[in-house]
Image (cartoon, rainbow, N blue to C red):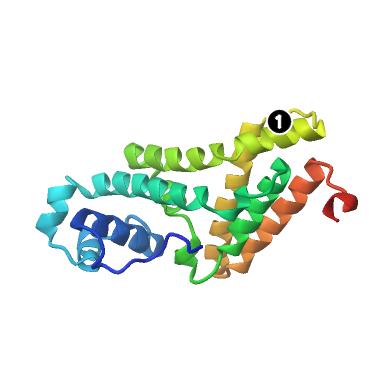
Amino acid sequence: MSRPTKQSPERGNARTRLLEAARDIIRVKGYTASTVDDICRAADVTKGAFFHHFGSKDALGVAAAEFWAETTSAFFAGAPYHDPADPLERVLAYIAFRKAIMVGDLAEFTCLVGTMAQEIYVSSVEIRDACGRSIFGHAATLEADIEAARRDRGIVGDWTAESLARHTQAVLQGGFVLAKAGNDPELARESLDHLDRYLRHLFHVTEDDRT
């Protein structure tokens, strides 16, 4: 299964091409440095077409975050980590899957909404909130499996499935930042290895469980 990534500018209508171009350019350059001209050029549309679909660059930013949420939700919904019968195995398979798709250039696997949220969380509340809906919405997809795993194994603690689901995203987003800072994708994969070990410890996974 391929991850959401670059698409040829010939595909889709003008609005879709603009959203795809924004997704790809912002992941490389960041939101502020990405201009309307850059996005129009990559999408092969005129500025008139841009402003026909989006009233401003910030309106595009909100739409890009929503487009990201929509397309990645479909991508993850069809991913193989849902297959195991055991809920904890599904959570661990999710972590393994996230590591497996960390391939290619940094911009191809890092998170659009995480990138934008870090940059504009004060300057554009609308974009920040759209990014938050995407990140927290994705985290919420893990809660049922985490809670089921907690019940199955009789785990008691001062944490919730919701908080642990958010923590998985904190590790992922932090891993992306480290990978960018060090220009090394392995730093993000390393963070997920630590997350896997942490989850196994938290849920008391023994060597017998692994056989």
Residue 196 relative to residue 136: left or right: right
Kind of element beneath mark 1: loop
Q: Is residue 133 above or below residue 4?
A: above
Q: Residue furthest left?
A: 48
Q: Residue at x 25, y 44 (%)?
A: 59
Q: Which residue is mark 1?
A: 159
**Which one is in front, 16 or 188?**
16
**Which percent across, then down, holds residue 148?**
70, 33
Q: Is residue 36 above or below residue 164?
A: below
Label total for image: 1
**Which one is in front, 16 or 185?**
16
Residue 109 relative to residue 91: left or right: left
Q: Residue at x 67, y 30 (%)?
A: 160
Q: Residues within 10 Å of mark 1 (few under 14, many from 20)?
A: few
Residue 49 relative to residue 69: left or right: left
**Which percent across, then down, holds residue 27?**
40, 60
Q: Quadrant of the C terminus?
A: bottom right
Rendered image quadrant of residue 140: top right
**Which percent across, then down, holds residue 83?**
63, 50
Residue 49 relative to residue 198: left or right: left
**Which percent across, then down, holds residue 44?**
19, 67
Rendered image quadrant of residue 133: top left
Rendered image quadrant of residue 162: top right
| Residue 171 in sight | no
Identify which amino acid the numbered label 1 is placed on: Trp
| Residue 181 in sight | yes
Q: Residue at x 26, y 55 (%)?
A: 16
Q: Residue at x 48, y 64 (%)?
A: 2
